[in-house]
Image (tube, coloured by chain):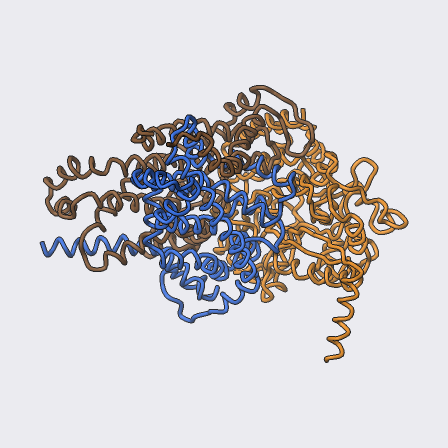
Amino acid sequence: MKVKKIVFYILATAIVALWIAPFMISFFTSFKSMDELMTTRKWWAPPKEWFPSNFVTAWKDANMGRYFMNTFVITIPSVLGALFLSSLSAYALSWYKFKLSKFILMIFVGGMLIPFQMLLIPVYRFSVSIGIYDKFIGVILFHIAFQLGFCTFFLRNFMKTIPSSIFDAAMIDGAGHFTIYRRIVMPLVLPALAALGILEFTWIWNDYLWSLILIQSDEIKPITLGLVNLQGQWVTSWNTMAAGAIIAAVVPLFVFLLFQRYFIEGLTLGSVKG
Amino acid sequence: MKKVLFVLLAISIAVSLLGTQKLVINSYMSDPAPKKVFAELVEQFEADHPDIEVTVNTFAHEDFKTLLRTWLNSSSAPDVVTWFAGERMRYFASKGLLEPIDDIFKGGFEAYFPGAFKSACAYGDRIYFVPQSWYWWGVYYRKSIFEKLGLTIPINWYQFLNTCEKLKEAGYIPITIGTKYLWTAAGWFDYLNMRVNGLEYHLKLTNGEIEYTDKGIKKVFEYWQQLVDAGYFINNHTSYSWQDAANYLFTGDAAMYLMGQFIKDVAPESVKDDLDFFRFPVINGEIGLYEDTPIDGFMIPAKAQNKKAAKIFLEFIASKEAQEYFASNLGRLAANKDVPAPDAHAQKGLEMILASNGVMQFYDRDTNPEMATAGMNGFVEFMVYPERIDLILNNLEIERQRIFK
Amino acid sequence: MKSQKWVPYAFLALPLLMYSIWVIFPIIQTLYLSFTDWDGVSPELSFIGWDNFKLLFQDPYFKISLWNNIKWLIGFAGISVPLGLLIAMLLDQKFKGSKVYKTLMYLPMTLSFVVIGQIWSWILEPRCGALNSFLGIFGLKSVGWLSDPNIVTYSLIMAASWRQISYAMVLYLAGLKQVPKELVEAAWVDGANGWKRFIHIILPMLRPATVVAVTVSVIDSLRAFDIVYVLTRGGPFYSSSVMANYMYIMAFNNYRMGYGSAIATVQFLITLGFIVFYMRNVLKKEEAL
């Protein structure tokens, strides 16, 4: 038994070590000089001399400060918008019996699973034609709409678990439909909203492709685009690129560490990822 | 100090009262050196034109290439974009996506630029492109390595093979190349084809008039295969960008790199002086010496918001001062004919071109963009699997027939 | 009581409107474009019937892409999912530090593909990257992870699996909450008996988690794009191309929007089968609706 326990610990530790090795490599790389990287090639070893200046280069040159703000400006309204609108649709799809209910639900679920390449060309053209191309609002509206499928599906699953007797009782008390939604259902799904919000935050924060297609001005680019710009300029400076990557990853990483429970709950409740 | 601030404030208020106009420029100059010089140029322009507020959006080179078409198509297109002269510009002009700019050249195009540039900047009888700088291609090499091994500059193919062999024996990578983004391989194809079959043949090919299965083309790959089979190219070149590959030249692991002058943009100070180039070796003495000389510059999308300011900007770019500033800071050749070569290195490049029998742009600038993608993929595939050459050329021929129908 | 028929539609109006504009209508438009020769620039386009699709099935690079998608599918559903289960089983026991271990295993899921791509680009770099440097210690020869056409797709799948395995593990950890801890522990220490118990008791209990993990992995493998785009763009010479990536190159590099739409359409139709399977499984219990 004792031996097995030790074997188990070694095995588990080995796997976890393997899993975080890429993180450690990036972390160490971001503090090394290119000379050290090229001469020793010991990626997995801590730097002999620490160079925080790589972060300064990355921060200054890639304009990370502004990209940070831009990402917040895009992400927060997108998450709030998606949560709000999907709570409406989820409410309708979970509490009311009507003819098209199942069909509409299938449309939402199907939409979240399609290859997004299907949308690329038309969404771009549409944004241009109504004048929201290269504006925050264009990306935000797209994110809200695109995430509606998953959010609706997710929240509906959750709302289904609320006993319908609560609903009936409220109806008898004469509460209006919107009052029930706002006063009764919403407070009950708050934990689910939190989980969903954390998940959506990470996804939208990490989006690259849609910003690439819908934004062209440096002024409003999010951090993922900034990072790729940095990559274009510092192709051979792996240390600077690593520093940039860490800067770009740090917010979702912290959000995750702070709200880990919600994040994991969100993933398992939603049973799908974007 | 306070006074200065006050004056500045007053000016800025006055300017804002007069109403500033916006000018949006999308640029692919993402390498640090050209990015910096271009930003300085823009500053100069803004100082001359305080009523115009310029925004420069910089994109990584490879992203820029895909995104350009989406911008040109959009109703909120940028006002000015960087691009390449030749077929790649003409493609957009032919679709009506570019603004003709003949009127910005007082005294005509030839008053600014060599007449030879005109065809690369025009579509039909109108000018759509302002050339900013141009450069030459050559075999860049490390002088110190050549000196150490007592190597001289190879003039002909036989000497070139010999040089490669000696470098290899001495433990160097004779030739570095990064083919991840394909176009570097097109440099080799251009030169081999020009040296084996001549310029006229090559231009016919890029025009879609010669079959890829032609005997002449097969011969080109026979020469290329000599280098591949002997293992003179760097291993795993398909996973490197051109800058990654250049790094092996800078670290002294590799000795030669067929590349454009802009390789100097990314070279560290410590090796810049050790970096020189020679003309691509002669293969057939009866064929003239031809070179790749790509022209870079600017154009205005047809759907630009502020064409007036865009034209003022391009006028500025065409001016001797602006051309000189850009060229001298980057060691390139200015398109403006009144600007001399900025340094000895550029002088050498210019002399090489002047002594040549003819020039072209570059494979992916002279042929149809779709054909270029197919062709360059084929070249890279050949460099990895030379034995597949017949299959590759057959496929390219099928593509050619579809594209140039 | 729930008789006012307009009520659900009132709640659905805004979300459905937005969804239609940005998701449903674009799908229809792409289907339409796949029958045209639109070049993305010209104002006019002509209807060319099935030509794009005919061309597509003669296109050797499309075949490579499709075949690579199948490799992704096997890698994701056939390897990532079982490995995720294995790790979940391993970590779902009572031991000191289990929480920290799990947290560390979750980390790859918080990263964007741009960051993942970058991290792996310096791990897989052929000459002095981390992996080859590591192999070098043992005197092993360098491998062209991203340059050897026979290997590159597997390298990409490996990079993507780093995240995918974590995801499968999360799903299984949730599923294992229904399974008594003693059973999990017994499965490990009980030798042949434990294995039997795992197959006959634990695995059936995990069926819902498996269904979700497998279908989502299949769907993800069919729409794989980001990692390929960041690391190789489908190269060298399309040997690591997948359908999504090939579509992007055709549509946005080669200006063949019609042809690109046709690729997206084929991709869509293949995925559709799995989407339907997913919905039938997930929504099956919704008969009450």
Task: Specify the colour of chain A.
Answer: blue
Q: Position of residue A165 (x, y in %)?
A: 29, 39
**Displayed quadrant of residue B249:** bottom right
The answer to whether B277 is drawn above or below residue B123 in the figure is: below
On screen, residue C109 versus residue B345, left or right, reads left
The reply to whether residue B245 is visible in this rendering is no
* Quarter in which the C terminus of chain A is drawn: top left
Is any atom of residue A75 visible in this view? yes
Q: Nearer the viewer, residue B185 or B316?
A: B316
Residue sitting at the far right: B107
| Position in image of residue C109 (x %, y %) | 38, 50
Q: x%, y% of residue B298?
A: 73, 49
The answer to which of B275 and A92 lies nearer the viewer is: A92
Outermost residue, front side? A173
Q: Residue furthest top?
A: C49
- In this rendered view, identify the residue nearer to me: A200 or B122: A200
Q: Is A22 on the left or on the right of C184, as rendered?
A: right
Identify which residue is drawn at 50% across, 61% down: A240
Residue in the picture at 25% in, 47% down: C87
Tell me what hue chain B is rendered in. orange
Q: Quadrant of residue A107?
A: top left
Chain given the colour brown: C
Establish if C120 lies above or below C12: below
| Badge count | 0
Which of B41/C25 is in front?
C25
**What is the x, y in percent for residue B307?**
78, 47
